[in-house]
């Protein structure tokens, strides 16, 4: 394959599946990373996206071939060249099928890098440990620590990492952010909640941002670019970068170029109008490893108000007062002890005492009154039993939206995507009302466990959105697997509340752009966002296949910035360069440094360390020199990330390692610490 991006790789890429994710991952690898891709799918003429994948195979400029197999067995994998492949992506929605293929592929080629799509993350972790153990026993390197040459270099140990990803989990933060705060995008890394926020250049420094991710074009261009494809392949190459910079310099950077400028230089921001908008990266919170322990509360009596109605509680209180009054009068009349008087009153109440024929008239009247009260007690006890039974049945069922609910999010669809989105909303303590037609949907267990108000109904039926209190809600999330249902729910919600914020799950980009422009023109005061789960997840899958850990992705309009952990050793674009010199405009930017030692580094930087403290330093001194043992987090465009991958250790034999200009080894040692403010 004649491509500088593919040199040094041990082989090609294999993708199994015929769904939307398989199509987008194939397109990502072939068009952005310039890899030769072999797709194993049941049929090119049918299936979910067989014809679309067949179109990629025949597209000029892409090196894609296909293998048709009803089940990706050993014969199909060997036909796809798995024994020579560098990486294998399993994109099926069936976890069991993906496990089967992964085990067969590891047996055929113990050195292949595996990227597995799995919904059950616990099972995925066990599977990753099992496959990494098998790779370790075969002599491959399962750690993926990047301390050796890349696959294909002489004398190297192949990188046989196993990465388990969930497309819905990867896309959930962006979907939740679009619903909760409109244009914000969020990402979790090292216990930090990171937010990409659109701010004007006048207010960009108020929240002390970590860095600038994008420069938004003029207002008119922003409106047009919002509906553009989020997986477009028209990211500019180097020549186009120079042309864009010349045009921007000639116009003073004041006119948009048809879309956002990703990772701009400070020179691009200088002299711009203060009303111009930019996307900056802000740190919101650091989550603790363990939840805060609540102070112990005093023991409480049984929550009677949740078991019995108000009328029944008042009736029980009145009956108790009546019995106490009868006991007090009996004590006064009989001149006995209070305990004896209460005992006699209860015997009369339950009609198990002898008649007071020879007793004074006062005691006879008290016995009659106690018997009358006992007759009133029987229906009261029956009501207690019936209401208790009804309350327990109600507690086992899902609650309905309560009266007075407002400021909530209406979530339509509790499938794979809806489940992860619901979990994110609950983590943020945002009130949610769910609508799901299938009682066996994956997210129903989460809704029951957290007592989330849920309507078991078809969202397209009349009155369902009204029952979900759509008029008082802050946003609608339409996340079913059918574009038509999502669109119908969104249009119906806009009819009820025109200013409602709407986030739709749409796959087709042309359809999404048309819908966006129509809703924008029809409801100019409302916010509309369309998100494709496979488009948001594809960069993470493709980056994992290239052997780098992708922490997450943030969409800017419908383009994507990828955050990935990259080893500095052997990469001439990073090693022995300062943070400022390693920055490439509109390609990549170093945003964080892993401060942990090489022996104690975590593979999963998206989680919190065992100590609960962060190990990533996000505010780097621009003069810090990146050393061979460092690991950094970069924000990059997809083409920029592919350039970093191509310049990695596999290229060391053909590219000299350069030090920072004017910095010798002793000079580098005197440069500032990365955490110097």
Image: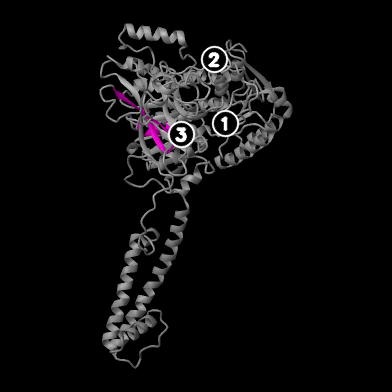
Residue 105 as seen in the image, left or right of residue 631: right
Which numbered tag is attached to residue 172? 3
Residue 325 on the magenta span? no
Q: Nearer the viewer, residue 456 or 72?
A: 72
Residue 190 on the magenta span? yes
Magenta residues, start to end: 172-200
Disc 3 + disc 1, Cβ < 8 Å? no
Which residue matches tag 2? 655
- Disc 1 on helix, strand or loop? loop
Q: For the residues marked 3 and 1, what is the alpha-carbon distance in whole angstroms?
A: 26 Å
Q: Is residue 539 above or below residue 243?
A: below
Q: Is residue 655 above or below residue 382?
A: above
Q: Residues within 10 Å of mark 1 (few under 14, many from 20)?
A: some
- Disc 3 on helix, strand or loop? helix
Foreground tag (2 vs 3): 2
Determine which quarter of the picture holds residue 7. Answer: top right
Q: For the residues marked 2 and 3, what is the alpha-carbon distance in whole angstroms?
A: 40 Å
Q: Nearer the viewer, residue 196 or 167?
A: 196
Q: Give the percent coordinates (x, y) of residue 209.
A: 33, 28
Q: For the residues marked 2 and 1, what is the alpha-carbon distance in whole angstroms?
A: 22 Å
């Amino acid at each position: 394959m004649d491509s500088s991006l593919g040199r040094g790789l041990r082989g090609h890429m294999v993708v199994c599946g015929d769904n939307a994710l398989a199509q987008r991952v194939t397109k990502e690898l072939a068009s952005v990373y310039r890899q030769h891709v072999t797709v194993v799918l049941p049929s090119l003429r049918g299936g979910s996206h067989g014809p679309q994948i067949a179109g990629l195979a025949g597209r000029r400029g892409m090196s894609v071939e296909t293998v048709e197999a009803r089940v990706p067995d050993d014969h199909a994998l060997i036909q796809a060249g798995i024994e020579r492949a560098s990486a294998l992506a399993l994109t099926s929605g069936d976890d069991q099928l993906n496990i089967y293929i992964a085990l067969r592929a590891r047996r055929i080629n113990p050195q292949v890098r595996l990227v597995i799509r799995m919904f059950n993350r616990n099972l995925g972790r066990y599977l990753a440990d099992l496959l990494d153990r098998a790779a370790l026993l075969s002599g491959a390197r399962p750690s993926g620590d990047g301390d050796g040459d890349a696959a294909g270099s002489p004398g190297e140990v192949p990188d046989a990492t196993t990465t388990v990803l969930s497309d819905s989990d990867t896309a959930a933060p962006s979907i939740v952010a679009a619903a909760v705060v409109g244009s914000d995008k969020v990402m979790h890394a090292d216990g930090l909640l990171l937010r990409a926020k659109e701010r004007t250049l006048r207010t960009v420094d108020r929240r002390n941002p970590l860095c600038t991710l994008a420069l938004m074009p003029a207002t008119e261009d922003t409106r047009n670019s919002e509906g553009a494809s989020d997986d477009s392949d028209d990211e500019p190459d180097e020549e186009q970068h120079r042309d864009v910079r010349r045009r921007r310099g000639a116009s003073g950077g004041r006119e948009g170029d048809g879309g956002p400028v990703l990772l701009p230089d400070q020179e691009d921001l200088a002299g711009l109008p203060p009303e111009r908008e930019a996307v900056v990266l802000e740190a919101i919170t650091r989550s603790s490893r363990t939840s805060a322990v609540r102070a112990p509360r005093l023991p409480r009596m049984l929550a009677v108000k949740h078991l019995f109605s108000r009328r029944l509680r008042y009736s029980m209180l009145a009956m108790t007062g009546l019995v106490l009054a009868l006991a007090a009068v009996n004590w006064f009349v009989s001149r006995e002890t209070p305990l004896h008087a209460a005992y006699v009153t209860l015997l009369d109440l339950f009609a198990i005492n002898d008649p007071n024929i020879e007793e004074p008239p006062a005691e006879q009247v008290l016995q009659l009154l106690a018997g009358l009260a006992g007759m009133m007690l029987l229906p009261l006890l029956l009501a207690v039993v019936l209401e208790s039974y009804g309350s327990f049945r109600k507690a086992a069922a899902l609650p309905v939206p309560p009266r007075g609910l407002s400021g909530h999010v209406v979530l339509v669809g509790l499938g794979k995507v809806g489940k992860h989105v619901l979990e994110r909303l609950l983590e943020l303590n945002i009130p949610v009302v769910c609508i799901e037609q299938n009682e066996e949907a994956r997210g129903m267990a989460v809704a029951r466990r957290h007592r989330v108000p849920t309507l078991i109904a078809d969202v397209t039926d009349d009155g369902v959105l009204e029952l979900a209190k759509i008029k008082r809600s802050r946003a609608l999330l339409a996340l079913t697997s059918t574009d038509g249902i999502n669109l119908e729910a969104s249009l119906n919600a806009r009819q009820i509340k025109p200013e409602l914020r709407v986030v739709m799950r749409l796959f087709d980009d042309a359809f999404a752009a048309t819908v966006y422009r129509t809703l924008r023109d029809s409801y100019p005061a409302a916010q509309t966002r369309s998100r494709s789960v496979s488009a948001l997840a594809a960069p993470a899958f493709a980056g994992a296949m290239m052997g780098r850990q992708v922490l997450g992705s943030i969409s800017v309009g419908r383009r994507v910035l990828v955050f990935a952990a990259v080893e500095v050793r052997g990469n001439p674009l990073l090693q022995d360069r300062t943070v400022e010199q390693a920055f490439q405009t509109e390609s990549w930017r170093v945003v964080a440094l892993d401060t942990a030692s090489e022996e104690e580094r975590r593979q999963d930087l998206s989680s919190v360390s065992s100590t609960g403290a962060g190990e990533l330093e996000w505010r780097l001194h621009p003069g810090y020199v990146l050393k061979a043992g460092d690991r950094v987090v970069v924000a990059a465009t997809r083409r920029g990330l592919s350039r970093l991958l191509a310049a990695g250790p596999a290229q060391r034999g053909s590219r000299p390692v350069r030090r920072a200009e004017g910095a010798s080894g002793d000079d580098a040692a005197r440069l500032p610490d990365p955490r110097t403010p």
